[in-house]
Image (cartoon, rainbow, N blue to C red):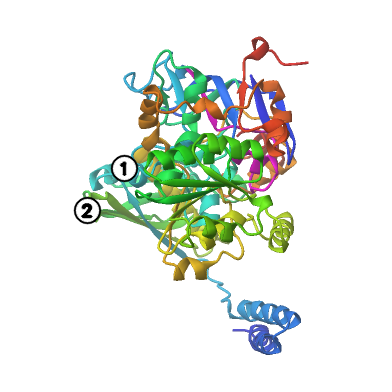
Amino acid sequence: MKAVCYMGAEKMSVETVPDPTILNPRDAIVKITSTCICGSDLHLYDGLIPTMEQGDIMGHEFMGEVVEVGAGIKPDKLKVGDRVVVPFTIACGNCFFCKRQLWSCCNNSNPNYWIAEEMMGFSPSGLFGYTHMMGGYAGGQAQYARVPFADVGPLKVPEGMPDDKVIFLSDIHPTGYMGAENADIEPGDTVAVWGCGPVAQFAIRAALSLGAERVIAIDRFDYRLRMAEAGGAETINYEQVDDVVQTLKDMTGNIGPDRCIEAVGMEAHDHGILYMMDRVKQMAKIENDRPIALRQAIQACRKGGTVSVPGVYSGFDDKIPMGAFMNKALTMKTGQTHMMRYMQPLLEKIQNGDIDPSFVISHRVPIDQAPQMYKTFRDKQDNCTKVVLDPWANGGALAA
Amino acid sequence: MSTQRWGALIGGGALAIYGISRRSPLGIALAAGGGTLALLGTRRNNTSLDTSTSTTLLINCTPYDAYKFWRDFENLPRIMNRLQNVSVLDERRSRWVALGPMGREIHWEAEITEERENEMIAWRSLPGSDLQVDGRVEFREAPAGRGTLVSAQLQYRSIPGGSTAIAKFFSKAANFAIRQDLRRLEALLEAGEIPTIEGQSHGPRDIVTGVLRLADPTRPRAPRETIKDAFTTRRSIA
């Protein structure tokens, strides 16, 4: 089959690899019909997260048709022919954490948990197409994928719903929603959202649906700010203001946004000396992440407010303003998305016509073009917000 | 403690104090270097090969489930990846085969010394074994329906006149190994299977992956597997 493989930093390549097989009783094999590049894949593309290996198959946002199930899967849970969206977090369904709906903290789905335990104390769940610290599972930017614990994760899609509307239930739609839910929004609240990428776009819309009075979105790309405005947000282009924190104070009667959603993560941009220091330290691998948006969110948040962090962080970071965090009595909530909590309810919202998630798609291309699209997406060229790959374009043949 | 160790401790300590008192970047470097030296000086040189290791894990199952799995020693190679095979000889005795240094097979016979149904099992290796290892496992119900606390304890002892290499090999990573073994038990009892990526598809692997797999402490070398073989096969297993 064809698969997008990580061949080193900024080197992606479409390779022909063996088709996946069932390895454990609760596995299934899915023939993929749509798959996407996620913003978090760009951190891997840039070579910034440790424990990637050459030859790893990328991708954690995919859907398709079940073509094989393992002996441990009961037919009422999943059977050959079912059309499913596969969540990016892998969960066993029966550990301490799964039983408490903390699906992304599953204790039993990461075969390399000992590496994560060294880095983080405990291991989160396994993820598709991510680092070996997160399990090293082959991902879904391919024609087929092996799905472990397939009787827990995959969501069956009702007939007649096109891929474009449901594919984002694999990650960014629930991730944006959980980002807003974690912000503990109350009626009358002003919510500030850092970043206007796809996760932020869903977070903006979810924040308004959860009762926010105002949403203020922060980015530097006009086309992304326009998309945020279309979703009901006011916007700040941070390249056109001196100080984001002061601008937010001015916009909120000097009280600050009640809730802050940090949907940027480890590769934030800014101007100024602190930003340059973070860049140098990240390149020299003495700081894993550039926590610029996180610092701003903590500084800007109103006293007693909530900072929600759906943005991805990987390791150890400098100059987090703990003094502000403590003295202002803030709450922080974060985590990889507990996917199985949100997939069914959000599917119903799509069915009811409350939201059509396909608005984020900017590019639909054959899988062979994935390597160029990583660069286009990373560099925000061609007004790129979301890339959907077709693994079977041109009859699925390898491009010459 | 030897003279060198005392020297390292005193000299390193002095350097650290001097470094701190200078309050400059050079001083910080001196303090860090001195501190490390002093720390090395305090480390005990453990000449004994006898090692005792223990760990406790919360597992979402009943004490009965965990006891039943463990009581059939033939199940243990599924969770202990250094074990090749266990055959039960009778109600109390069993024969164990494990992978030792350089992928060598190590044999021993064990007998159960004490057991209480759904509560605990203790066993010891019998004379004539390649390795002296005594084990004990306890199962206690956790509060508030959280499942079962499984505590395992293993003691490795060198056999007088026996191979020190074998005792060293098993003592060296004993703490790590027992935690991994119980994590696999947790996966098996809670999820019904142990998560794996071995045998999955991937693109072309490079030398780095081969080296990483060779150094992976969760993958013991198979019997009669040379380093060269291990390197070439492991590069492409997952």
Please name the residue shown 27% across and 46% down the image.
Answer: B67
Residue A237 lies in the magenta-colored region: no
**Closer to us: A262 or A93:** A262
Q: Secondary structure at mark 1?
A: helix
Please name the residue shown 40% across and 45% down the image.
Answer: A212
The residue that mark 1 highlights is A99
Q: Secondary structure at mark 2?
A: helix
Inter-mark Cα distance, 1 to 2: 13 Å
Horizontal side, residue B225 vs residue A91: left or right: right
**Closer to us: B30 or B156:** B30
Horizontal side, residue A367 vs residue B117: left or right: right
In the rendering, which numbered label is found on residue B144?
2
Percent across and percent down for residue A225 are 60, 40
Percent across and percent down for residue A277 are 72, 62
Magenta-tinted stretch: A39-65
Horizontal side, residue A46 vs residue A206: left or right: right
